[in-house]
Image (spheres, helix red, strand yellow):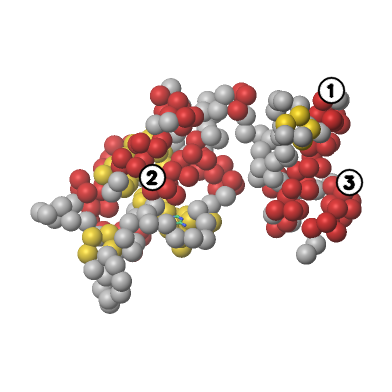
C-alpha cells in the first residue's frame, strides 16, 4: 500500500513515521509513505500558498493551484485516480471500519490543510472525501494524516508480525479489549487474576470476553448497540449494568 501525503510540513511526517512498527514496514516495503511538499508546486514567485478568504473572516486559506498541481503530480506518477482524503474536522469521524476500508487501496492520498482550511474548489476537483479524527480542532491535518497512516498500515498484510496480531483488539466486533497482565505475579500488592494462571484456555477466553463486555459497558456503552451479542452476553451485561448506571 502506498500513502501519498500532500503537506506543507513534510518533515513532521517523515520524522514521526520513520520510527517503530511503521518505520520497519516502510523499510521492508510492506508500505510506502511519500510526502509531497505543496509549496514546491506554487506558481507564486514569492512561494506563497495561501490568501485571504473572499467575503472576509479570520485567517488565511490554502489556495487551489498549488494543491491541485501537487495532487496531479501523484496522479501522473501512479497512472490512475487515487482515493483521496482531506483531513478536516468537518469530515465523517474516522473509525476502525473506515481503517479496514482504506487498507485495501493500493494508493491513498491524504491532503493536510493548514491555516483556516483550503479553497473548496480544489476539494471538488480532486474528489476528496472529508475525514475527521475526532470532535476537536488541530492546527493542521498532519497529525490526523499520521493517525490514519498508522491505523491503516497495521491492517496491511506483512506490517504486523504474528505476535503483534490485530484480531483480538479493541473495536474488532465493536468491543473494547480485555485487561492484560504480565510478570511479576504480584506487583505493589496487586495480584494477577488467578484464572489467567489456570491453564484452562476455555475459561480464560470466557473471562476475557466478559471483561471485554464489562469494559465496553463502562467506557463506551454506545458500542454495545453495534456489537454482535449472544443471549448469554446480554444476560451478563444485564447482571452488571447496575454498577455503571449513573
Ligand atoms: N484538522 C484539524 N482538525 C482536524 C481533525 N479533528 N481531524 C482531522 N483533521 C483535522
**x and y, in percent, of residue 169 in the image:** 66, 38
Residue, disc 3: 232
Picture residue at 18% right of the left edge, 52% below the top: 42
Q: Is residue 240 left or right of residue 8?
A: right
Extreme front residue here? 188
Task: Determine the image quadrant of residue 50.
Answer: bottom left
Residue, disc 2: 109
Q: Between residues 164 and 185, which one lies in front from this camera angle?
A: 185
The answer to whether residue 96 shows anywhere in this view is yes
Residue, disc 1: 199
Q: CA distance from mark 3 to mark 1?
A: 23 Å
Q: Is residue 122 above or below residue 29?
A: below
Q: Is residue 163 above or below residue 84?
A: above
**x and y, in percent, of residue 110 in the image:** 39, 47
Secondary-structure class at tag 1: loop
In front of the other: label 3 or label 1? Answer: 1
In terms of sequence position, does the residue under pointer 2 or pointer 1 come before the other? Answer: 2
The answer to whether residue 79 shows anywhere in this view is no
Amino acid at each position: 500500500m502506498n500513502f501519498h501525503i500532500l503537506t506543507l510540513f513534510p518533515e513532521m511526517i517523515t520524522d514521526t513515521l520513520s520510527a517503530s512498527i511503521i518505520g520497519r514496514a516502510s523499510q521492508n516495503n510492506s508500505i510506502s509513505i511519500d510526502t509531497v511538499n505543496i509549496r514546491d508546486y506554487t506558481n507564486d514567485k514569492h512561494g506563497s500558498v495561501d490568501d485571504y478568504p473572499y467575503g472576509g473572516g479570520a485567517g488565511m486559506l490554502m489556495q487551489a493551484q498549488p494543491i491541485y498541481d501537487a495532487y496531479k503530480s501523484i496522479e501522473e506518477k501512479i497512472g490512475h485516480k487515487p482515493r483521496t482524503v482531506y483531513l478536516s474536522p468537518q469530515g465523517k469521524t474516522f473509525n476502525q471500519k473506515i481503517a479496514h476500508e482504506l487498507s485495501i487501496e493500493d494508493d491513498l492520498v491524504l491532503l493536510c490543510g493548514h491555516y483556516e482550511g483550503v479553497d473548496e474548489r480544489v476539494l471538488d476537483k480532486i474528489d476528496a472525501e472529508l475525514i475527521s479524527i475526532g470532535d476537536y480542532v488541530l492546527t493542521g491535518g498532519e497529525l490526523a494524516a499520521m493517525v490514519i497512516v498508522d491505523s491503516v498500515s497495521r491492517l496491511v498484510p506483512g506490517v504486523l508480525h504474528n505476535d503483534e496480531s490485530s484480531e483480538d483488539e479493541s473495536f474488532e466486533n465493536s468491543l473494547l479489549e480485555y485487561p492484560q497482565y504480565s510478570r511479576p505475579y504480584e506487583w505493589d500488592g496487586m495480584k494477577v487474576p488467578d484464572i489467567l494462571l489456570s491453564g484452562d484456555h476455555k475459561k480464560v477466553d470466557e473471562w476475557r470476553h466478559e471483561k471485554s463486555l464489562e469494559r465496553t459497558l463502562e467506557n463506551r456503552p454506545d458500542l454495545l448497540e453495534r456489537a454482535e451479542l449472544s443471549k448469554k452476553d446480554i444476560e451478563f451485561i444485564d447482571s452488571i449494568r447496575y454498577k455503571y448506571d449513573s
